Image (cartoon, coloured by chain):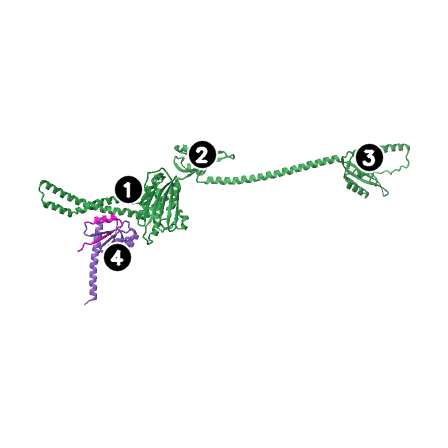
Amino acid sequence: MTHKRSGTDGAITRKPRRRTTLIPPQSIAALRRQEWELADFIDNAAVGLHWLGPDGRIIWANRTELTMLGYTAEEYIGRHIADFHLSQDAVRDILERLKRNQTLRDYEAQLRCKDGGIKHVVISANVLWLNGRFVHTRTFTRDITEQKLAQQALQRAHDELEQRVRERTAELVRANGELYAEVLHRQQADQILSRLAAIVESSGDAIMSLTLGGRILTWNRGAEQLYGYAAEEIEGRRIVQLVPSERQEHVLKLFEQIHAGESIDHDESICLRKDGARVEVLVSMWPIRNSAGAVTGASLIARDVAERHRLQQQLAQAQKFEMIGQLAAGIAHEINTPVQYIGNNIGFVEQGFASLQRFIVASQELIERVRLGTAGLEDAQRVQALSSELDIPYFQKEIGDALAQSKDGVARVARIVRSIKELAHPGQGRKTPVDLRRLIDSALTMTRNEWKFIADATTEFDTDLPVVMGIEDELHQVLVNILINAAQAIEEVANDGTGAKGEIAVSARHDGDWVEIRIRDTGPGIPEAARPKLFEPFFTTKEVGKGTGQGLAIARSVIADRHGGTLTFTSESGKGTTFIIRLPAGAPSEPAQPGRWQDAPANGSVRR
Amino acid sequence: MLRPTVLFVDDEAHVTSGLKRAMHRASYRILTAQSANDALAIMAQQSVDVLVADEKMPGISGSEMLAIARRDFPQTMRVILTGHATIEAAKRAVNEGQLHRFLTKPCTAAELSEAIEGVLRQKDLTADANIVIRALEADAQAPW
């Protein structure tokens, strides 16, 4: 059909349709050609074509369809279409729809090829009806196998991709989770680190980190205060700069220990301040290890112990005076009593000497007269009378005793004064070899007046008793404290009416690397409730004026902190208490005999 | 007149023998005891004019003994000679023992003699006063 433009006004007009009623011969030839061309066109169309009869049998198919499925026309045409469909349900459905005059568009189906292969196709079809009669179907079959395969491949690729994406996503989630945990961990670690840094920085102790070669890496404020160097002055310098020359070798040994992975606990040391002053410190060191466990450096904490020592000493000194105050009455008595008879005896000896001198002069005169031959009997009688007038026989009898007793008294006074001096004198806080026998005797002397009326004291020393390295006045103080307690305990049961004396038994034994001193009393025992608090400062069961509760606290501090020993006790109600002091042993000292503790005898020595 | 008797009590024999020597020139008869019980036993047997006691002794203390002596032997003058004068001991001795002198060690022979002489004079005066009082009492009972 053609459209022509006519007129100049642009309007389109349609020519009336012409009807051909007669066909000329040349037209028949043209028609035949036309028919051939059409058949060829249909045969070679890009899609497969077939017609089905109402019974579903194939009436006609074009070459494209035959080629597509690989059948010859004879093998294909005349067969029921269901023979070629993979799905009988699909065939039934297609035929049903067509019979209901539906037009199928791109209905997907699978057809069986001659070689056994399957072709994926889409079918478009409807029915040619003539006067309500099913003539045949018009079925267009397009091969989409490649497309389908491509699609499937694509789907597979897609699925695979999705799977991979899922996997990667999961991986990412996991990694993300790990990262999050890591971040959290880092944050916590950072918090801990900054907290630790704050602690390190605010610590009163000097804290530093060091290389294995002894170079200072970090330096806190406590170190600045202790050593007098600012961090920027000292970081990178060597630690030996802070150590007096005579101790440097010792410090090198400490580093060897660190190198070997050992830590150093509370090493008593001396350090040098920037201003040259020497400070007593307690040093602890630990190896710093890398993640592989290898020692890469050292951390070091140094504490100024001078201040603590000073305070401890002051407290101990104060308690010492409190103790001496308590003992004052007894000590005064112990001194004044001998002084009393020493004074009386000296006065007596003085008189005696004057009398004796007069008697000697008279006697010499008599001798002279006898020599000259002028002496008469009356002269001798006068001298004899003088002797009784001057109490010469009495003086002769008494002077020896008066002198011996005075000597006793002098020894006693000397002993107690020495004990007071030993106790009251603030020591240098330095350890020296201490003879425990002498120290125990001295403590018993000091406290004698506290127990002499109510108890007997005995001492027992191992013959191989070693000396201990100790701070003498502090150990003395401990012994005196415990002996005062023992005396006070015994006093509680002394006036029970039986009149029986109590007992204080002091022993010192050698026990391997230790020396053990036991001080046993026969007092009432320590009340159960008081036992756990016995060594606490200010804890006392004593009445006012008999102690402020410092004695045993200081005693324990002296024994444990200053001497590395232990102070314990056992106590039994109604039986008494035993205090047990254990001290590290030093070298052995000369042997001693056990015995009853006595006052200084006339010769001034003490029998043990 | 009889020589006055002085009894020294001290748990330490050295002290009493020292006192005895210091007083050997004085005109007293001197006795010694080493404990309160011994001293009280002596006093039960013989008259003692002056009792000089240490405070701190095992068993009965000096001031306790003075209290007993005051009750049982009121004629005896009471002196404390202590090694350490505590307020407590002094209070006890004054309040319970109603002592006449309180001395502390060390005490010289001269101080001791002076104290003993002093309490003996006091004792004489008391005795004289007692005679006068008894005479007055006798008069009061029989005024005519």
Q: Which residue is mark 1?
A: A605
Q: Position of residue A503 (x, y in %)?
A: 33, 48
**In this picture, residue A440 sits left or right of residue B132:** right
In the image shown, does A225 or A580 lie closer to the viewer? A580
**Chain B image colour:** purple
In the image shown, does B11 or A169 lie closer to the viewer? B11
Q: Position of residue A94 (x, y in %)?
A: 79, 41
Let me know if marks 4 and 2 both belong to one chain. no
**Highlighted magenta segment, given as a residue range:** B1-24
Mark 4 and mark 1: Cα distance apart in space: 43 Å
Q: Position of residue A355 (x, y in %)?
A: 17, 45
Do the CB atoms of the residues marked 3 and 4 lie less than 8 Å apart? no
Q: Which residue is mark 2?
A: A257
SS at mark 1 in the image: loop
Q: Amino acid at mark 2?
A: Gln
Q: Which residue is mark 3?
A: A75
Let me know if marks 4 and 1 both belong to one chain. no
Mark 3 and mark 1: Cα distance apart in space: 147 Å
Q: Amino acid at mark 3?
A: Glu
Can residue B34 be seen at all in this image of the molecule? yes
> Quick one: which residue is furthest to the left in this view?
A374
Q: Which image quadrant: the N terminus of chain A?
A: top right
Crowd around label 4: few <14 · some 14–19 · many ≥20 (10 Å): some
Mark 4 and mark 2: Cα distance apart in space: 80 Å
Let me know if marks 3 and 4 both belong to one chain. no
**Chain A image colour:** green
Q: Which residue is mark 4?
A: B70
The residue located at (80%, 43%) in the rendering is A96
Q: From the viewer's perspective, is the residue at label 3 or at label 1 nearer?
A: 1
In the image shown, does A570 or A71 lie closer to the viewer? A570
Q: Amino acid at mark 4?
A: Arg
